[in-house]
Image (cartoon, coloured by chain):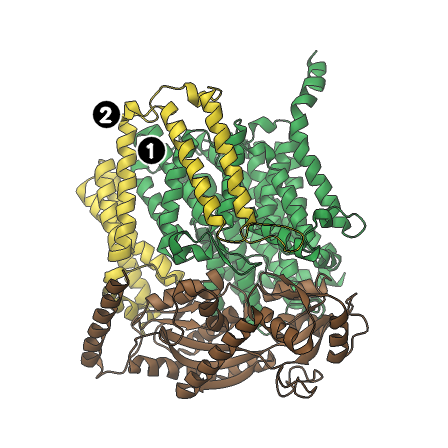
Chain colours: A brown, B green, C yellow
Amino acid sequence: MSIIKKLALVVVSLSLVAVSSVSSAKPFSPKKPVELIIPAGQGGGADEIARLVQGVIEKNDYASKPVIPINKSGGSGGEAMTYVKKKAGDEHTLIITLNNVLTTPVNQPELGIDFFNDFTPLARLITDTFLVWIATEGKNTAGVETFDDFIDLARGNGLVMGGTGSMSEDELLLGMMRGQFGFDAKYVPYSGGGAVAKGLVGGESDFTLNNPSEQMGFYQSGDSKALVMMTPERNPAFPEVPSSYELGYPDLEYYMMRAFMAPAGIDAEVEKYYTGLLHTVYHDDEFQTFNIDDGKLMSWLEGFGLKDFLAIEYEKHGEIIKNFN
Amino acid sequence: METVGFLLDGIFTSLQWFNLALLIFGCLIGLFVGAMPGLGSVNGVAILIPITFIIPPTAAIIFLAAVYYGAMYGGAISSVMLGIPGASTAVATVFDGRPLAVKGEAMTALTAAAVGSFVGGTVSVILFTLFAPPLAEVALRFNAPETFALMVMAFATFVGLGGDDVPKTIFSILIGLALSTIGLDLITGKPRLIFFNIPGFLHGINFLVLAIGIYGIGEMLWTLEETKGKVQMSKLSVNMNEVGRAFGALKKTIMAMNIGSFLGFFVGILPAAGATPASLMSYGITKQLSKNSKEFGSGVPAGVVAPECANNSASTGSMLPMLTLGIPGSPTTAILLGGMILWGLTPGPLLFTQEPEFVWGLIGSLYIANFFTLVLNIALIPAFLMVLRIPFAILAPVIFVLCVTGGYAPTQSLHDVWLMLLFGFAGYILRKLDYPVAPAVLSIVLGPLAEKALRQSLILSDGSMGIFFDVSEKPIAAVIMYIAIVLLIMPAFGPLYRRFFKKKQTA
Amino acid sequence: MSITNKITVKRAEIAVAVILALCSIALMIKSAENRITWNAEENMGAGFLPFYLSLGMLICTTLTIIKFVLKRSPQSKDDTPFIDAVAFKFIAVTIISLVVLVLAIGYLGIYFSLIFFLAFYLRYFSEKSFAFITIFAITTPILTFLFFEWMLKIPLPQGISEPLFYPVYDFMYGGFSFAVKMIFIILTVVLPTALVFLTTRFIK
C-alpha cells in the first residue's frame, strides 16, 4: 500500500511541477472558495480567529473568492491534520493552528503525520497568552492574593484544575508547573474554554489556565481574577496582572500560536499569494483592534523565521510531553 | 420594570420596516435550512456571520434570531412530512408527527407543531424576562454531577419508549450508547474504537448520521417494500374543516403544552443540556403522565406538541447561559457567541447591565421572530402538504439526495455518508425484526453528554458514585437522581398498579 | 425468486442475532485496546464504558438467541418469507444504486453523479417521459449547487469535475451586479423548474 501511495505522490508532484512550470507566467489567485480547516470545534479560540479572518477578507474584498471555515475537531486536531496531509498539492486549502499541531503528531503516532513535511507554514499572526485564574470567591482559594500565595496553598492541598481536555495545552502546562513548583492538582477536562471558565466560577474547580478571552466576561464582572500572566511583560488588557518574569519565574512562559499553514507541495507562487493575503488581513485595523482588546499579542512571523520558530516549538513540546509522561 | 421597557424597545425596533423585512427573510431562510435534513440553524447562522459585518449589529441580531427560530420550526416540517428529523431538536417530533402524516393528518401535525412552538416560545420569553438573573445563578451551580443526574432522568423518562421485546429494546439503547463512545475520549485524550484506523472515526459518530440513516434511508426502504413503489405517500385534503379540526385537536394538548414550555425552559437554561434533551424529556414525561400513553407513537397531537413546545422554549432558555456565562449550549449558540465577540460584546454576568439594549433587543426579536414564524408556518402549510402529493417514485430519489447531502454537510466527510447508508440498511433490517430503533437514536444523542458528566463527576469524587446521592453536599444532583430512580422503577410497578387499581374501577 | 422464499423471518432472526453477537464481541475486543478497569487507584479507563456496554449488547443478543431456541419470540415461529420477491428486487436496486452513487461521488463529484443517479432511478421506478427525466436530473444538481455552494457556502465534493466549476465560481464571485446574477439564476433554475412542472402537467 505505502509503495503505491508513494508512487502516486511522486506522480502527483511530478505532474504538479509540470503544470506549474506552464502556468507560472500568471500570478496565482484562487479559482474556487478556499477551505479554511479549523482543527477544533465551533466557538473555541481558533474558530473565533478563523471566522474573524473570514469576515475581514469578505468585508474588504481582500480575496477574489471567499474563505470558508470548516470545523474538523476530531481527535485533538488529528482528523484535520490527516485531511490536510491528504490534500498535498491542493491550492485551495488552509489550516489554522492551535498548539495541537505540535502535540498531536507526537501523541498519536498512528496517524502518520510528519509535522515538517506534511504542511507548508505560511505565517503566524497572533500569539495567545495564558494566565492562572482563580475564582474571587473560591472556597478553597480564599485569601489567595498573589501567585506565591497560590503556590503555597497548592503545595499543601490537592486543588482541582479545570482544563480543556486531556493532553491539551493546559494539561501540559500543568505538567510544567508541577515540575517547577512541586505541586500537583486534580485535572478535570471540560469540552471548551467557556465551560472551563464557568466551572471555575461555579465552584467546581479551584483554578484554571485559561486564555484571556475565555475568562474576559467573568474577569470584568469581578467573579474571577488572574494571578500571573505567563509572559515576559504585562499586557495592556490586564494592567494589574503581573507577568511571570516580574515574579521571578522566567521559566513559566507559554503561548498559543495562531498560525496558518497550507498543505505540502504547493507552488511558491501560491505560498506567496496566501502569505500576502494574510499580511493584508494582519494589518487591517479591525483585526488589530479586536485582537489587542482581547489581550492577544500581535506577532507576525513568516518565512525562515517561522520555520525556525516551529522547529523550536516542536522540540520544546516534544520535551514537555516526554516529561509529562 | 426597566427590563420590560428594554424588552418593548427591542420589540419595537424589530418592527421597523427594514428590520421586519430582514426578519421575515430570515424566518424563511431558517425554515428552509431547518427543513433540510442534516442542515440546521447552525448552518443558517454561520453563513450570516460575515453578512453581519455589513449590516448594523441590531439588524444582524434580528436577522440571526429570525434564522434561529425559523430553523427550529423547520426541523419539525421534515420530521412530519418526510419522517427525517431535520435537526436533533426535532427527533422526538418524528415519533408522533410522522405517524400522523401517514394517517393522512399531516395538517394536524403541522398545526400542532407550529402552535406548540409558538406557545413554548411565548412562555419562555415571559420566564426569561421575569427570572433571568436568578436563573443565571442556578445555571452557574449546575455542574457535572447535576448534569449526569439530569441525563439519568432523561433516560428514565424514556423507559417506556421501546417495544415489547425487552432484550431487543435494551440492545438498542446499548448500541446507541456504545456508538456514542467512538472517537476521542475527552477525559483521557485517547482515541477509542477507531476501526481499521480510518480517520473518519476520530470525530465520532454524528447523531445526524444515525438519524438520517435510520429515518431517511431506512424509512424509504421500508416504504418501498410496503408500497412496491406504486402508492402515494398518503391521502390528502385541505379545506377549512380540516383546519378547524386541526385546531380542535389542540384543545386536548394543553397538558403537553404546559409540560413542554416549563420543562423545556428549565432544561434549556442548564449549560450542558440544551434543546435536544429538553424535547426528548418533555415527550417522555408527557407520555408517562398522559391518560392514553399507549397511543403515543401511533400519532397523537400531544406527542408533537410536547417536543416542539419544549425545543422552542429551550432555545430561548439556552440564550441565558450563552449571554451570562459565555457557554455555548449548542453549535448554533457557539457561532452566535463568536459573532457577539466579533461585534465587541463580552458575554458574561455584566452583559445584562452593560448592554441591556443588546440583550433585550435579542430577546424581543426572538419573540417577534417566533410570532412571524408561526404566521408564515400556518400560511405555508398548504405548500408543505404539496410534498405529499408528489408521487413516491419521484419523492424517493429526492429524499435520497437530501440524505446524501445531509449526511455529508455537517462534517464534510464522505466517510459519514457511507456510515449513513450502513445505518440505514441495518436499521431497516433490524426494524423488520422488531428491534426498536428510537432508543438507539436517543442514546446516541444523550450518551456523550452523560458520559462526560459522569466521568467528570467521578474525577471530582475520586471514583465514588456517592457524589450523586449526597443530599447535603450536592442537593440538586441528589434530588434529580432520586426522582430519576423513581421514574426508572415506576414502569416496573405499572402493571401491578393496573392489576390492583384499574380492575376496581371497571368493576 | 426462490432465494427470498428460503430466507424466512425465522432464519433472518437467528442470523441477525448471531451477527449482532459477533459484532458485540468485536466491539469488546476493540474497546479493550484502552484500559477497561475502574478501581480505587485509577479512575475509569477510556475503554471501561464501551467494553461493558458491548458486554451488555452481547448479553441481550444471547437472550434473543435463547428466546429463539426456546421458541419464545414471535419471530422464532414465523416461517413466512422475510421479504417478498418483488419488494426484494426494489430494495436491492435501491441499495446498489445508492452504493454506486456514493462511490461515484468520491470520484466524479456529487453533481455529475446525481445526474446519473436520478436519471437511472426515475427511469427504473417511474413511468415519466424521457423529457421529464432529463430536465429533472439536470435541475436537481443545479439547485443543490446553488443552495449549498452559493447560499450556505458549504462545499460539496467535486472529485475530478472540479476544474469545470472554476468559471462558475468566477461568475459567482466576480464583479457582476446582483441583478445580472439573479437573471442568471432565473435562467438556470426557474426556467427548468417551470418546465418540469409543465411537463408533469402535460407530458405523462
- Observer-nearest of B253 and B328: B328
Query: Please, which residue is most extreme toward the top here?
Result: B507
Residue C14: x %, y % from top left: 40, 28
Instruction: Please say if the residues under marks 2 and 1 sit with CB atoms less than 8 Å apart.
Output: no
Rounded to the nearest whole Å, what is the CA distance between mark 2 and mark 1? Answer: 18 Å
In the image, which disc is placed on residue C1?
Answer: 2
| Image quadrant where residue C105 sits | bottom left
- Say which chain tag 1 marks: B
| Image quadrant where residue B382 sits | top left
Compared to residue A97, the image places residue A123 above or below, namely below
- Say which chain tag 2 marks: C
Q: Is residue C105 left or right of residue A281?
A: left
From the image, tell me which residue sits under label 1: B224
Q: Is residue A231 visible?
A: yes
Compared to residue A172, the image places residue B223 above or below, namely above
The local secondary structure at tag 1 comes to helix
Which quarter shows the C terminus of chain B?
top right
Residue A83: x %, y % from top left: 37, 64
Q: Residues within 10 Å of mark 1 (few under 14, many from 20)?
A: many
- Observer-nearest of B275 and C87: C87
The local secondary structure at tag 2 comes to loop
Give the residue type that dot 2 points to: Met
Compared to residue B65, the image places residue A141 above or below, namely below
